[in-house]
Image (cartoon, rainbow, N blue to C red):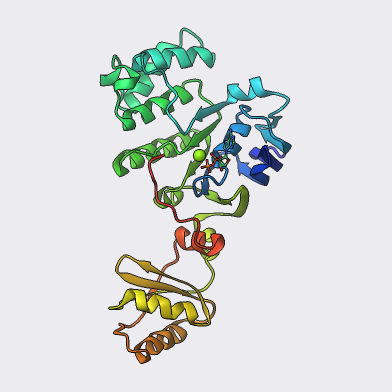
Amino acid sequence: MPEDLAIRTEGLTKKFGDFTAVDHVDLEVRRGEVFGFLGANGSGKSTTIRMLCGLLAPTEGRAEVSGMDVREHPERIREVIGYVAQFFYLYGDMTVRENMELFGGIYGVPEDELPGRIDRWQERLDLGQYSRVLGADLSMGMQRRLSLACAVLHQPRLLLLDEPTSGVDPLVRREFFDVIGELQDEGTTILVTTHVMDEAERCNRMSLMDRGRIVAVGTPAEIKEMSGGRIYSLEVRDLAKALDLLQEREGLRQAQPFGRQLQFQLAQGGDDEAEEIAAWLRDQGLDVDDPEPVRPTIEHTFLTLLGGSGSEEDDGQ
Ligand code: ADP
Ligand code: MG
């Protein structure tokens, strides 16, 4: 495994009975990057991460973390990674500080260093005033912070964050990503799963997963390019009728409502072709404004590559 990689998988596969949850995944995460692991619910993100942590044995294929095979060195891998599971797994009947003491101990933080590290992380994540509060009494946002604090106490080189911000408000989400950026500056590699698009924007590179397979890998800009043809937005009075009509029309990749507007993507061409479509809709008796070009987003690529199945919003899971 090349030195500059933090994670490498080859043909990594997990089956549950007949069902293939992770299907021959080849993934390379470079040291020092923040890598976004995107995909709709059920696409296999958590299962992949659990294999990388050594918590779940692959059915087929291999995975290396920090140069170590996950099957051969599960114990040593746990020393170099920090893992925040998708669902809250801390002890509800223990205080914030007690949880941190417990996890610090489990991960082998030297006893004389532990109190100082706990103090620093409590301060950094604004947990200080909750130090004596029971895990179960914390808000979702505070639980997430505590999960992160417990995962970083042993100063892991690689952090695996499984939807660390689901169920929390956008402000907490942004703060979380600020901390992720700071950890990156300190040399940590971070793999973070999300299906929230503004989080994806903050990653250096990302992959899109669909039904167990990786369907795209790249920087946010590269991923947006993969959306294909030019995208336009159109103000139209009768949105439903316009959508119906456009289903029949050749030369379009996709058409969908976007708020009160209609967005469509051309298979080829640009402004002239978009004008032509608007004119054609007018000919069909619709009240249509001039089309405005729209910058492609990661979500557009999702729609293009996943055939419309990948645009689920954060549902708090
Ligand atoms: P994601 O994290 O992308 O939402 P998961 O990795 O949790 O997806 O799940 C991928 C698929 O595998 C889902 O269809 C899920 O129901 C299934 N799955 C996950 N864990 C198990 C399990 N232990 N037994 C059976 N099926 C599972
Ligand atoms: Mg998951």
Residue 124 x, y percent position in the rendering? 34, 27
Tell me what residue is drawn at x 47 percent, y 15 percent. Answer: 104
Above or below for 71 versus 214:
above
Image quarter (top left, top right, bottom left or bottom right) of the C terminus: top left
Residue placed most toward the observer, 109 or 260: 260
Residue placed most toward the observer, 237 or 158: 237
Locate residue 22: give its quadrant.
Answer: top right
Q: Is residue 56 visible?
A: yes
Residue 155 x, y percent position in the rendering? 51, 24
Residue 97 x, y percent position in the rendering? 36, 15
Q: Is residue 187 visible?
A: no
Residue extending farthest top:
112
Tell me what residue is drawn at x 53 percent, y 81 percent. Answer: 251
Tell me what residue is drawn at x 51 percent, y 62 percent. Answer: 301
Image quarter (top left, top right, bottom left or bottom right) of the N terminus: top right
Above or below for 148 versus 290:
above
What is the number of callouts on the image? 0
Residue extending farthest front:
18
Tell me what residue is drawn at x 47 percent, y 37 percent. Answer: 185
Above or below for 104 versus 200:
above
Above or below for 72 versus 312:
above
Residue placed most toward the observer, 238 or 194: 238
Residue extending farthest bottom:
283
Residue 282 x, y percent position in the rendering? 34, 89
Give the side of residue 7 with respect to residue 106, left or right: right
Give the side of residue 243 with respect to residue 17, left or right: left
